Image (cartoon, coloured by chain):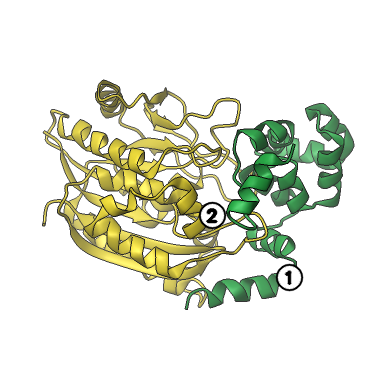
Amino acid sequence: MNAALANAEQEIPGTFIFDGALAMRGYALNKMCYSFNEARNRAAFLADEDAYCELYGLDARQRDAIRRRDVLALLEAGGNIYYLAKFAGIFGLDVQDIGAQQTGVTVEAFRAKLAAAGG
Amino acid sequence: MARILGGIYTSHIPAIGAAIAKGRQGEPYWKPFFDGYPPVREWLDAVRPDAAVIVYNDHGLNFFLDKMPTFAIGAAPEYRNADEGWGLPTLGPYAGCPELSWHLAESLVADEFDMTTCQEMLVDHAFTVPMSLLWPEPERRPPVVPISVNTVQHPLPTPARCFALGRAVGRGIASWPEDIGVVVIATGGLSHQLDGRRAGFINREFDLLCLDRIATEPEALTRYTIRDLVRLAGSQGVELIMWLVARGALGGHVSKVHSHYHVPVSNTAAGVLVLDNEAA
């Protein structure tokens, strides 16, 4: 089941290649996150998360990752970062917040690393 | 016959849109980035394009995984922006030029680039942010033909294919019978990675090489594979393929008007480049 992911992570460490295998695995999760383009859907999710996940047919692994707001687990469950960004947006999290979470550092440390990359 | 005036290549990071909305252009974090744009607007004031072809990638506003066109072309009288879910103000609408769109669709498909045509197409930050940077005053914006390239779901079109598409776009514009000037715009890049344990990856050396090669030797960049670009520029640094489309539309010899590079803007290395197609 993890063949595509394993290949990609072997190829380029720490990097997902969102290909057909991941796109199939994450379809329901991504479809739910795509719905968060609309304010009324974000409100419906916040009103009853479990019911909203049920409506889109997320599997147990995806629902658990949603519950924990765990970006790496969501990616491994087939989430695509562009749709997941809409999920993160519900909580006011931006790409530095989720970058820090994924790399296990504080947001300040993540920002400092980006600034240092300017050379 | 329409003339291609030149190409503009620019990053499209959503945070830029937020900074513009909040009037933060002069703040210390933002000024070094926004300082890259007055020369772009000066060039636009000088060449005054009648139309713009804008090559961008949708990030899950218009297209979902149910139907994901590799290459799509807008053919609408007007393009609307909408809520992307994380708080950018909704901008636009933006005037289209559907006659030129259909001419390009005819020309591209005859040229064996089988485009998906869209009579309705919501445009996301990858379209709106560059429009705000290039033409802050909405009334000065020329009508547009948007071309969307899939960068969401692999397989993505190869750099070589994107460059070839650009060549075909150039032939299509050149065969438009009206005597108008067209600017070709690419949005995206430069190096960045949002997802995975390598999030925050930036490759200054590769970005500077790309900024140079796009102008002088774009064919060299077409030898990379998509996997190469992911490795060298990050998962989202593959947006360089939009630059290859827009570079392909220009001639072999162009003159560099302006280039600017700044790290970081949000998680991204920001680049902007202006190439004049007629001054060479």
Query: What residue is shown at x 43% (from left), y 74% (from top)?
Result: B32
Q: Position of residue A65 (x, y in %)?
A: 82, 46
Can you say which quadrant of the picture contains the C terminus of chain B?
bottom left
Q: CA distance from mark 1 to mark 2?
A: 23 Å
Query: What residue is shown at x 57% (from left), y 71% (from top)?
Result: A114
Q: Is residue B257 visible?
A: yes
Chain hosting mark 2: B
Specify the amino acid type for callout 2.
Answer: Pro
- B166 relative to B71 in the view: left or right: left
Can you say which quadrant of the picture contains the N terminus of chain B?
top left
Q: Which mark is residue B14?
A: 2
Chain coloured green here: A
Query: What residue is shown at x 41% (from left), y 64% (from top)?
Result: B206
Q: Name the one closer to the observer, B249 or A32.
A: B249
The residue labelled by disc 1 is A105
Q: Quadrant of residue B169?
A: top left
- B86 relative to B160 in the view: left or right: right
Q: Which mark is residue A35?
A: none
